[in-house]
Image (spheres, rainbow, N blue to C red):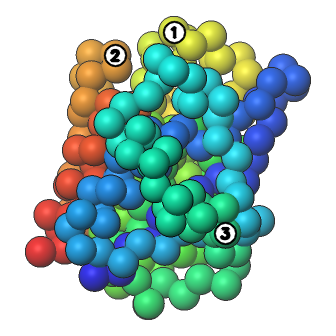
C-alpha cells in the first residue's frame, strides 16, 4: 500500500508579512495513521525539499499526540526535509493521494498544474483522493468527465465561519467553503473546530485540523 502526501511550498500569508505553510497536525496525524497501517508514505511538494510549517501550528498549545510523536521521530523529520518534487510524481505508482491543509495550499497547490493533473489522474483511475481543512481548495480547478470534480459530490472543508474566526477572510485568495459551492459541490459542515469528514465515492474531505486523523482513516477504509 503506497500513499502519496502532497504538501505546500508556499510560506507567505498574502501581503500580511506573516508566514504560513502547512498545518503540522494535518500532516502528522495522517502520516502516522498511514504508517501505523503499514503503508509506504511518500512526501512531495511543488518545490521539493523542506516544506514550510505554519508557525501558528507549531506553538506549545498547538501540539497534539501526533505532533509530539513527530518531534521525537528523526526519520520522519528527515523525510519531511527531503520531499520529492511534485512534477516528478507518477500517479500510477501510488494507491491514494492525501493533502494536508494549512493556508499555504490556497496559493500554490490550488493553482499548480502538476497537482491538478495528479488529482484528476487518481480520480480517473478510481483511487482515493483525500484532503483536509484548507486542502479541499486544491480541488478548485480539477475536472472529471468535463465537469468540476466536486460537482454534485458531498464535500466539506474549512468553513467560512472558521476563516472568520482566525481573521483571515480578507487575506486568503479564496474561501474554501465558497469555492467548493461555486464548483457545484454539495458542501456540508459541522460545528466550528469539531471533527467532520465526508466520504463520497473515492473522495474524502475533512473540515478542519481536528478532522485530520479521521480523514486519514477514511482514506484507509477505501484501500482495504
User: Which of 139/183 is in front?
Assistant: 139
Circle 3 is placed at which residue position? 82
Q: Which quarter of the image is occupied by the N terminus?
A: bottom left
Kind of element beneath mark 1: helix
Place of residue 95 in the rendered image (x, y in percent of width and height, measured from the top left): 33, 80
Vertical placement of 4 versus 50: above or below? Answer: below
Q: Quadrant of residue 125?
A: bottom left
Residue, x 57% and y 67% (percent of image)?
79
Contact, CB < 8 Å: mark 3 with mark 2?
no
Q: Residue at x 49, y 44 (%)?
A: 71
Q: Nearer the viewer, residue 2 or 69?
A: 69
| Label 2 element class | loop
Disc 2 to disc 1, C-alpha distance: 9 Å
Residue 165 has which mark? 1
Return the disc, 3 or 1, that comes first in the chain's sequence.
3
69 with respect to 33 (left or right): right
Dividing the picture into quarters, in which one does residue 97 lie? bottom left
Residue 78 lies in quadrant: bottom right
Q: Are marks 2 and 1 in contact (CB under 8 Å)?
A: yes
Amino acid at each position: 500500500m503506497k500513499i502519496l502526501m502532497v504538501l505546500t511550498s508556499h510560506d507567505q500569508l498574502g501581503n500580511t508579512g506573516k508566514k504560513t505553510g502547512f498545518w503540522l497536525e494535518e500532516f502528522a496525524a495522517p502520516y502516522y495513521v498511514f504508517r501505523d497501517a503499514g503503508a509506504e508514505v511518500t512526501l512531495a511538494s511543488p518545490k521539493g525539499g523542506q516544506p514550510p510549517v505554519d508557525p501558528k501550528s507549531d506553538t506549545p498549545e498547538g501540539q497534539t499526540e501526533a505532533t509530539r510523536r513527530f518531534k521525537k521521530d528523526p526519520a520522519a523529520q528527515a523525510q519531511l526535509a527531503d520531499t520529492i518534487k511534485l512534477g516528478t510524481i507518477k500517479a500510477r505508482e501510488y494507491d491514494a493521494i492525501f493533502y494536508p491543509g494549512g493556508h499555504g495550499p490556497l496559493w500554490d497547490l490550488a493553482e499548480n498544474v502538476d497537482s491538478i493533473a495528479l488529482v484528476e489522474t487518481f480520480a480517473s483511475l478510481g483511487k482515493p483522493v483525500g484532503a483536509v481543512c484548507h486542502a479541499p481548495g486544491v480541488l478548485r480547478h480539477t475536472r472529471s468527465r468535463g465537469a468540476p470534480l466536486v460537482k454534485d459530490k458531498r464535500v466539506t472543508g474549512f468553513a467560512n465561519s472558521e476563516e472568520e474566526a482566525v481573521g483571515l477572510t480578507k487575506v486568503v485568495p479564496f474561501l474554501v467553503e465558497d469555492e467548493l459551492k461555486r464548483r457545484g459541490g454539495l458542501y456540508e459542515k459541522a460545528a466550528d473546530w469539531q471533527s467532520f469528514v465526508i466520504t463520497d465515492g473515492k473522495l474524502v474531505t475533512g473540515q478542519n485540523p481536528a478532522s485530520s486523523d479521521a480523514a486519514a482513516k477514511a482514506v484507509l477504509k477505501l484501500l482495504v
